Every structure is written in C-alpha cells, then in structure tokens.
C-alpha cells in the first residue's frame, strides 16, 4: 500500500525515539473500532512508544488510494505505530517490505506459498488475502518527527464480498481450514520486526527488493498497468532502487511506475 503523508498534526510533542521492535511493542486489543490505524496513531501520539492495536472488527476501514476495506469479524485487523528514523530511501521501500513480512508470516502460519503483486498485494493461489496501508504524520518543531502506522488486514476466516478490489479475493481458511487470526498475528510480529531491521541495516534496501522480487507475480511478463484515467502496457522488468515498477514497452522505452493497478496477461482486466 502507499505511504500516504497526512501532514503535521499541530502538536509539539518531544522527539521520544525508542527502538522499533514490533515483536515486543505494547499490544492493545479492542472490539469494534473505526480504524485500527487511527487508534494506533492516537496512542503513539499520546505515549510516544511503539504500539500494536488489534480489533475484532473495523467499521470504517480503508485501503490504498482511499478504497474502502470490508472488515467483518473473523479476520485479522492489526496496526503497528512507531516513530521512524529510517533513512528516506529505506522508508520508501517500507510498503513493499510490509508485503514481504505478511507473506512470510502467512507461509509460516499455514504452510502455503504466497506471492506478491506490485506494490504490496499479497496473494494465495491468485486471490488477494491482505490489505496494507502505511500512513505517516510529520510533526515539529522543535525537532521533526515522523510518526508511522502500518495497517494490515488479513482475510483469515472469510473473504469479504462487494469489495472494490480489481483482482479475486480469497481467505486463508479456504486453503488452510484450521488457521485462525491469532496464529497469523503470532507470526506477523517477528516477520515485521525482521523486515524493518533489514531496511535499517547496511545493504538492507537491496535485500528487501530481492526478497520482494523472489515472490513477485508477473516478473518478466507482459503486464497492464491501470491508472484512474489511463492504461499502459509493457514488460515488468523489476524494481528500481526506490521500489518503482520498471515497465519496458514494445519499442524499448522505459517507464517508472509509482502508483497503479497491475495485471498480468492471464488476469481479467
């Protein structure tokens, strides 16, 4: 999902920087909420320390590019909020890194083999099982502070109907009947900790790109990229260092795609 800057929140909170460790952050469990991202960001602003928020159900969930995300009980709705000091180039890869973490967690929890589609759709047997939304708030002075919340919704118990997704939607229980949301979350925490630590390490950006590409759907194939008012076609030739999709057209022209919906030839568009 996209990293969507929301602008400053007008608060002059002190820059309390703590270790970013999703595997050991505080955990808040809630019932029905509007949005776990909103709940987690509010707690981060108030407490200044990393926090997970889990909910049974979201009433106003949202996805990438403002799309609604259906959030009924039985699935995993989790948001991790933290204060980021990741370098700018590493932060740009965060949405793709989160997709890698979710894919790793699902594989570990279910034994399935997940794939990813640019920028951060997570697929099981061609069906989308996860929505990811990364949002930020920048505050200051006296010191600039980037608050980040990573929202992750995994279809565990059921696949929502009536979504605006352009690709088929599935749920984990269709492929692994014994799975539950708590088991997925227990694997998600260390998986997310791993990718964030990797991004912050020397050569971490390249490592995350390689891990994402190893799971990528359509790499080297003809794809169609759909925008709001246009489409573009070409060969999916990998990712540039900032995570943009490299699209090579029939004449050899190269485009770097920053946003859009990607379809491989075998998919209905």
Image: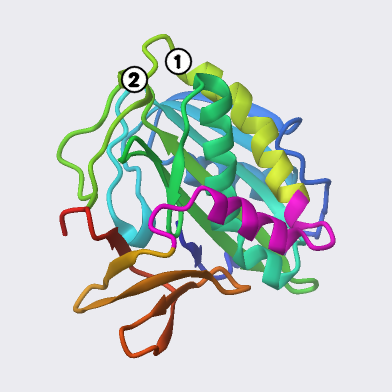
Q: Residue at x 36, y 51 (%)?
A: 63
Q: Can the viewer see residue 79?
A: no
Position of residue 87 relative to residue 64, above or below, is below
Q: Which residue is mark 1?
A: 180
- In the rendered view of the protein, which quadrant contains the N terminus? bottom left
Q: Is residue 201 magenta?
A: yes
Pointers 2 and 1 in contact (C-beta within 8 Å): yes
Q: Can the viewer see residue 20?
A: yes
At mark 2, the secondary structure is loop
Instruction: Please state the horizontal and vertical placement of residue 261, each as a whole percent of the image.
Output: 31, 63
Instruction: Please state the horizontal and vertical placement of residue 15, each as a whole percent of the image.
Output: 80, 60
Position of residue 91 relative to residue 123, above or below, is below
Instruction: Please state the horizontal and vertical placement of residue 211, each as a whole percent of the image.
Output: 62, 51
At mark 1, the secondary structure is loop
Q: Which residue is mark 2?
A: 157
Q: Residue at x 34, y 20 (%)?
A: 157
Instruction: Please state the horizontal and vertical placement of residue 156, each as a whole percent of the image.
Output: 38, 24
Alpha carbons under labels 2 and 1: distance apart: 7 Å
Who comes first in sequence, dot 2 or dot 1? 2
- Which quadrant of the view contains residue 259? bottom left
Front-most of residues 26 and 186: 186
Q: Which residues are magenta?
A: 198-219
- In the rendered view of the protein, which quadrant contains the C terminus? bottom left
């Amino acid at each position: 999902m996209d990293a969507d800057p929301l602008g400053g929140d007008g608060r002059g909170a002190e820059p309390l920087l703590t270790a970013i460790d999703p595997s050991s952050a505080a955990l808040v469990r809630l019932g029905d909420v509007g949005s776990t991202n909103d709940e987690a960001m509010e707690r981060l602003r108030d407490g200044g320390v990393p926090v997970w928020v889990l909910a049974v159900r979201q009433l106003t969930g949202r996805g990438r590019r403002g799309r609604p995300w259906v959030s009924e009980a039985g699935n995993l709705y989790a948001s991790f909020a933290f204060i980021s000091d990741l370098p700018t180039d590493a932060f740009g890869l965060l949405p793709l890194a989160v997709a890698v973490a979710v894919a790793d967690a699902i594989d570990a929890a279910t034994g399935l083999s997940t794939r990813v589609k640019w920028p951060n759709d997570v697929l099981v047997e061609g069906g989308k099982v996860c929505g990811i939304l990364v949002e930020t708030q920048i505050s200051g002075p006296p010191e600039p502070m980037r608050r980040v919340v990573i929202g992750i919704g995994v279809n565990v118990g059921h696949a929502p109907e009536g979504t605006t997704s352009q690709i088929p939607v599935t749920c984990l229980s269709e492929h692994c009947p014994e799975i539950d949301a708590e088991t997925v979350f227990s694997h998600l925490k260390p998986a997310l900790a791993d990718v964030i630590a990797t991004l912050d390490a020397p050569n971490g950006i390249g490592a995350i790109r390689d891990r994402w590409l190893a799971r990528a759907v359509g790499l080297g194939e003809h794809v169609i990229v759909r925008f709001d008012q246009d489409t573009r076609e070409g060969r999916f030739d990998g990712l540039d260092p900032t995570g943009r999709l490299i699209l090579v057209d029939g004449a050899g022209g190269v485009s770097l795609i920053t946003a859009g919906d990607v379809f491989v030839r075998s998919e209905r568009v």
